[in-house]
Amino acid sequence: MSDALNFTDKPVVLIVDDTPENLTVMNALLKDDYRTKVAHNGERALKVAQSDPRPDLILLDIMMPGMDGYEVCQQLKADPKTAGIPVVFLTAKVEVEDEQKGFDVGAVDYITKPISPPIVLARVKTQLTLKAAADFLRDKNAFLETEVARRTRQVSTIQDVTIMAMASLAETRDNETGNHIRRTQNYVKLLAQELQRQGKFSAQLTAESIELLYKSAPLHDIGKVGIPDSILLKPGKLTPEEFAVMKTHTTLGRDAILAAEKLLDEPNSFLEYAREIAYCHQEKWDGSGYPQGLAGETIPVSARLMAVADVYDALISRRVYKPPFPHAEALEIIRAGRSSHFDPAMVDAFVAIAEQFRAVAERFQDTESEVEAKARAVTPH
């Protein structure tokens, strides 16, 4: 039983030669230490090389009728299944040009005829040792790549879960439902993709940055956790003093995310987008927004995207203090805010894909029971 197991562990050597005597000699020399396969021409060698178990090494005669050794080697190297098998040429040709041609087509070594058994055994052992090392490194690299990919997915998942947990924390404080988070992040992604398609903001809106924007959008109102219930949950209109406090949710959100950024050793683009959106999504194109009164292109692109998404969602959403606006009316209100509230390019892109916004709104629509349950949950007792 032990011998059988050892036999299956032996490397496989394919011997290719059109002379039966040469095959017999080489097979007799190698069979005690290796599993051997033989082929008497190039066509047969290619078939044997692809059959299981595949050779770990091929000893290949050059001068053969039909397909010579050079052509066999070229075809072996052109096939991904056999490209990694080292090929050692067996030949009586000793000219430098012949050797160079062999190396050019992919051979790793030459053994000249008539053969010297000790040289054959030494060369075979050396090439098999090199192949074993190369296989080990390749397998190790494949394992490491798989492990890196797994851990990257794990980190991304943890990041996503953390984001949603933080966003849900903010959502528990006000009249918004969890669907608001899902809708707005999808609006932002759709709008960014449309602008990218139009060739606008190409430097800022890469595929990678759009995905980061999608993930960071749920944190736009994280600062509301710092607003008193008496103001945040007030059903009526806020006084000027109360509204001044409400406006600080942008600064509170920025500060919370900035504190997280400072814990990292290097800048993080995801948190940068989250900070921009939280701080600047209430800014307006004409400079009349808050907290800084930024205008035009001084407002980060991420915040300009969120401004459209957030206002549209506020318009079409049901609240305990107002019914939802129809999609068409919300569209006209956004259009009317072009060049005043919103970046004109953002509005134009929104109008072009307004039906996709409607589809997202319908997919993540708040039911009346959800709105009522939310109202009961945040109403002070």
Image (spheres, helix red, strand yellow):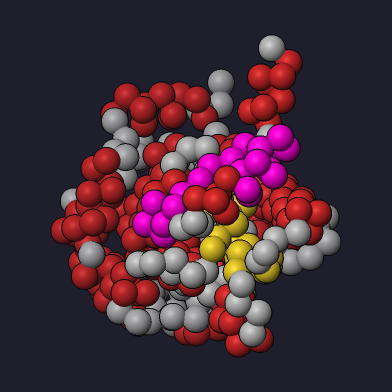
Quarter occupied by the C terminus: top right
Q: Does the magenta stretch include residue 190?
A: no
Comparing 118 with 363, the one in front is 118
The image shows residue 374, relative to residue 53, as above or below, that is above
Quarter of the rendering containing residue 352 = bottom left
Q: Which residue is drawn at 29% across and 29% down?
A: 368
Q: Which residue is drawn at 59% across and 82% down?
A: 98
Q: Residue at x 22, y 69 (%)?
A: 351
Can the viewer see residue 185 in this picture?
no
Q: Residue at x 65, y 66 (%)?
A: 113
User: In this picture, which residue range is highlighted in magenta?
Assistant: 25-44
Q: Where is residue 302 in the image (x, y as percent from the top left)?
A: 50, 68
Can the viewer see residue 339 in this picture?
yes
Q: Is residue 29 magenta?
A: yes
Quarter occupied by the N terminus: top right
- Horizontal side of 142 relative to 83 (left or right) equals right
Q: Position of residue 238 (x, y in %)?
A: 50, 51
The image shows residue 363, relative to residue 259, as above or below, that is above
